């Protein structure tokens, strides 16, 4: 698969008679662009959400009204429709950028987390070479709970990295599939991840295993095997452990063991780990943020703000790793750095 993939827009509103070119001009600097995989739960998103799995917009001819109707359109009215459409798109895009104005995204204090160096993806960014990132996981990677595809964490991450490296060719592929955990993910690891030859794989795993009462030890063994296969093709890896949420907290013992074992696997395989459980717990217990601010009403999946802050903190770590390479601090992949976030 070629590394030179165009970024796709997550949403493209369709308005009869409106020029798609004008809408693209208004939206392109603002929206995050990724290549999400088709997933079974995509239909469960808001009715206002258009599937991100339809990257090819309909042609102008297909969207246009029949010739007779087009001839009857008042140019002044047409201009008004165009303006309203563009304003609506700008409004949606702006909400993606100012979400932290309501609740700031603050790095947790006193949460020690380990993030191994990401030499492969960092070196490619520094060298100006194309970078492919695969976000692998279940429904919280897919983006269940977000109100629009561009508000999922892979899209947020893509937008952040492109802001930081505006000339870089960065592709973020969303390979999340709701309801899965390590057993199901291992079955599609080759086609959904390895065959894409990614520079970085961000693997979110463990939550559904906790909810399904699967043995955390068996999950850890599968994840270790999967990481070894990913590393064999030269990819950097970052693990993401379960989320802190009411439904996960009902299985506190299993969740605690899962996060511990995933941390052990990361240390053994010398890969990065983002301690999502500890970070989200700090939002609530350390920063006094109500759970409903970052978890939706199902008590499990993250809200737009939750995905946004999670992506921001994860992106900050990736950017720091790139900064180390730029400064000549070539931290070996087997050296783990512990620091407060």
Image (tube, rainbow, N blue to C red):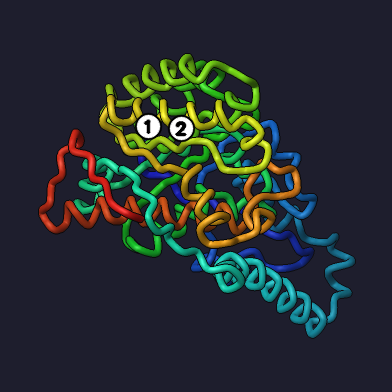
**Which quarter of the picture shows residue 224?**
top left
Q: Secondary structure at mark 1?
A: helix
Q: Position of residue 242 (x, y in %)?
A: 53, 36
Direction left: furthest residue: 328
Which residue was labeled with disc 1? 263
Q: Is residue 10 above or below residue 29?
A: above
Which residue appears at 42% of the width and 38% of the height? 202
Of 132 and 116, the residue lying toward us: 116
Q: Position of residue 94 (x, y in %)?
A: 60, 71
Which residue was labeled with disc 2? 259
**Which quarter of the picture shows residue 215?**
top right
Q: Is residue 94 above or below residue 34?
A: below
Q: Position of residue 243 (x, y in %)?
A: 55, 41
Q: Secondary structure at mark 2?
A: helix
Q: Is residue 180 above or below residue 25?
A: above
**Which quarter of the picture shows residue 37?**
top right
Of 261 and 59, the residue lying toward us: 261
On the picture, is 298 further left or further right than 173? right
On the picture, is 171 further left or further right than 269? right
Label 2 packing within 10 angstroms: few (<14), some (14-19), many (20+): many
Q: For residue 278, which numbered disc appears in the image?
A: none
Q: Position of residue 259 (x, y in %)?
A: 46, 32
Between the C-alphas of marks 1 and 2, the distance is 6 Å
Say if mark 1 contacts mark 2, CB within 8 Å.
yes
Which residue appears at 39% of the width and 25% of the height? 194
Which residue appears at 53% of the width and 68% of the height? 104
Label 1 packing within 10 angstroms: few (<14), some (14-19), many (20+): many
**Quarter of the image that includes the N terminus:** top left
Which residue appears at 35% of the width and 55% of the height? 341
The answer to whether residue 224 of the structure is visible from this angle is yes
On the picture, is 298 further left or further right than 113? right
The answer to whether residue 11 of the structure is visible from this angle is no
């Amino acid at each position: 698969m070629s590394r030179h993939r165009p970024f796709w827009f997550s949403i493209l509103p369709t308005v009869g008679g409106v020029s798609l070119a004008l809408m693209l001009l208004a939206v392109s600097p603002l929206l995050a662009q990724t290549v999400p995989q088709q997933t079974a739960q995509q239909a469960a998103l808001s009715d206002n959400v258009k599937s991100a799995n339809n990257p090819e917009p309909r042609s102008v001819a297909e969207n246009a009204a029949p010739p007779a109707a087009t001839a009857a359109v008042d140019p002044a009215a047409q201009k008004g429709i165009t303006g309203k459409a563009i304003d609506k798109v700008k409004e949606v895009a702006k909400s993606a950028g100012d979400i932290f104005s309501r609740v700031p995204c603050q790095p947790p204090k006193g949460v020690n987390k380990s993030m191994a160096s990401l030499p492969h993806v960092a070196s490619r960014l520094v060298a100006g070479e194309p970078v492919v990132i695969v976000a692998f996981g279940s429904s919280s990677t897919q983006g269940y709970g977000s109100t629009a595809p561009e508000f999922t964490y892979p899209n947020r991450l893509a937008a952040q990295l492109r802001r930081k490296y505006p000339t870089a060719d960065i592709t973020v592929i969303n390979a999340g599939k709701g309801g899965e955990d390590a057993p199901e993910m291992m079955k599609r690891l080759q086609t959904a991840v390895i065959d894409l030859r990614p520079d970085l794989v961000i693997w979110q795993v463990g939550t559904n295993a906790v909810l399904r009462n699967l043995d955390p030890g068996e999950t850890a063994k599968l994840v270790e095997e999967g990481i070894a296969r990913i590393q064999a093709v030269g990819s950097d890896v970052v693990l993401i452990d379960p989320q802190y949420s009411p439904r996960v907290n009902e299985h506190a013992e299993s969740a605690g063991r899962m996060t511990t074992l995933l941390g052990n696997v990361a240390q053994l395989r010398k890969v990065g780990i983002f301690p999502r459980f500890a970070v989200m717990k700090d939002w609530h217990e350390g920063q006094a943020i109500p759970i409903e601010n970052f978890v939706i009403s199902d008590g499990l999946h993250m809200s737009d703000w939750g995905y946004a802050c999670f992506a921001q903190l994860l992106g900050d770590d990736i950017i720091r790793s790139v900064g180390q390479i730029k400064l000549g601090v070539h931290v070996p992949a087997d050296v783990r750095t512990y620091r407060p976030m």
